[in-house]
Each structure stands twice: as C-alpha cells, then as structure tokens.
Amino acid sequence: MVGFAFLATTVNYLDRQVLSVVAASPDFKAVVPMTEQTYGYVTAAFMLAYTVSNGLSGPFIDYVGTRIGYACCMLWWSLAGILHVFARGALSLGCFRFLLGAGEAGNWPAAAKLVGEWFPSKERALASGIFNSGASIGSVISAPIIVWLVLWQGWRSAFILMGTLGLLWVAGWWFMPRPPKGAQDEGLARVSAWRLLSTRFVLFFTLSKVFMDPVWYFFVFWFPKYLAEVHHFSLKEIGWEGWIPYFTAAVGNFAGGLLTSLLIRCGIAIPLARKLSTSVFALVMLSTIPAILTKDASLAIGLGGGNK
C-alpha cells in the first residue's frame, strides 16, 4: 500500500513539472505565447488552488474515506493535466493549472491517512518517509523524461502521458484490499482544527514554511525556464542537466534526517537537535542567491542544489 502512495506522489511531481520543462519548448511557445509576467500568473494560479485545496481535501477524504478520496484526487489532477493540451493562451492555461493544483493537493492528506490506516504507530514514520520520497524521485526524473517525450512526440505528448499514468494508477488502486481493522485507530487522537492552529508549534512551523517553501517552488516552476532564457540552454541540455538541483534536494532530504539523528546521539535534546538541523539547511539555501546571480551555467546549477 505504501508503494501505491509512493507511486502517486511520484506521478504528482511529474504532472506538476511538465509545464516548467515544456515552457522552454519553441513549439509550445508558438501555441501558447507568454511573457515572464504571464507565466508567473499561471504558476500563481496553481499555487492558489493548491493552497485552498490543502484545507479542503483533508475533510473531503475524511468524509468519503481514503479509498474513494484518493482515487478522486488522482482522477481529478490526471484529467486536469491532460486538459493542458487544449491551452491556447495564458488564460486557458491558467485555468487548467488551477484545476491541477486543486487536485494535486489531495495527495498528501490521502497518503497520510493511508499510512494511519495500514500501519501501526511504530512503523508510520518509515512508511511516511517512503511515500514522501516519491516527491524527490519525481523531481529528479521529470526533466529527462519530459524532454525526451517533447523531442520525440511533441509537447502535448508529455501532458497526455503523465495524465495517463495517473489514470492507470486509479485503475490499479480500485482493486486494492481494504485496510486491516483496528490499525487506523491505534495511537490516534482527534483534535479540532482550531486547537491545532492555536498551538505554538503549528504557528512556528507554518511560519517556517512561508519563508522556505517559496525557494523550493521557484526551482520547481522556474529553473528549467531560467536555464533556457538566461543561460540559453536547449531543450536537450535541460534534459541532461536540469535534474541536478532536484537530485541534490533528494539527497538533502536524507541528510537532514541523518544530521538530526547524529545530534541526538551526541546527547543533544530532540527539540534542539531538530532546530539546529533545520537552521543549518536553511542557511545552505542561501546558496540560491549566487546561483541566480552568476553568469556561469555550471556554477548556477551546482549552487542551485542547495535550495532544499
């Protein structure tokens, strides 16, 4: 079951990154002409829907159940991804991105609920780590795969194939067994949303996300386009080298957990160890400043790897 959540998360990131790579294609630019400003509006449409849907998809999945809720989210964002082939301008493209963001946000509460239903409390951290790694894997493989599809069959094929992967996932998901009885209630306590929002931990965690997540999303949505427009990379060159910052981000995910574990083993209290680890990697993210300013493409890609 955690393998299904891992695959869904991988497809989630493949779908969201199709546009960032395809936007560098001359054929796409001819059909959907956009300035840098309008491209920013299009990506903002995705993030707006993603933000709103984060708060709505969780209650929806709780109401209909993980089986139906997860399938609905995947079906929604897969069809929204395929609809991108009908874009003829920034407005229509922004509408399709909005629909994509509304569906993709549901992956995370659905996967978390699946872990809670299928795994005892002592195994949930490992299961969550496995499905979350799908985001890193999807980011790493997206550029080479999408570039290959665009060069082979045109930009529309990338949207169609990634959407089709989601539809195949739904078909397989529907035949999976029901969760074991009792596992979903172990170690869980029901807490009101207002109580969560009023806690100091949630407040500061949300604040940290406000400052750190935009750096990551800049690379998700803008880095391939940045390589094309600023460093004049061809689509093939983006496929060969554009994946490097995402790979180092995946390594950073594991390095962050490893550093925290090492600090704890050295006798540092768990809360302080987590804060120190987060602070270290937040400082590493400052490497994005010289990455954007440098005129050397190789240096920009290398420094860009510190973004997460």
Image: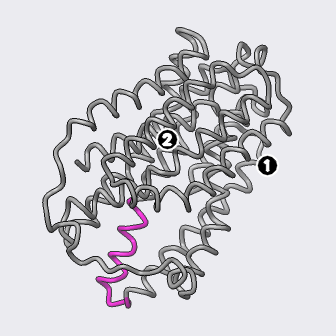
- Identify which residue is drawn at 28% across, 59% down: 115
On the question of residue 219 being in view, the answer is yes
Residue 293 is labelled as: 1
How many residues crowd mark 1 within 10 Å: few (<14), some (14–19), many (20+)?
A: few
Q: What amino acid type is highlighted by mark number 2? A: Tyr
Examine the rendered structure and indicate whether residue 292 appears above or below residue 85.
Answer: below
Examine the rendered structure and indicate whether residue 145 appears above or below residue 279.
Answer: above
**Mark 1 or mark 2: whose residue is earlier in sequence:** 2
Left or right: residue 168 versus residue 210 is left
**Is residue 166 a member of the stretch shown in magenta?**
no
Q: CA distance from mark 1 to mark 2?
A: 27 Å
The C terminus lies in which quarter of the figure? Answer: bottom right
Return the x and y of residue 229 as percentages of the image width and height: 78, 30
Examine the rendered structure and indicate whether residue 259 appears above or below residue 15.
Answer: below
The residue wearing badge 2 is 13
Examine the rendered structure and indicate whether residue 144 appears above or below residue 301.
Answer: above
Residue 183, picture quadrant? bottom left
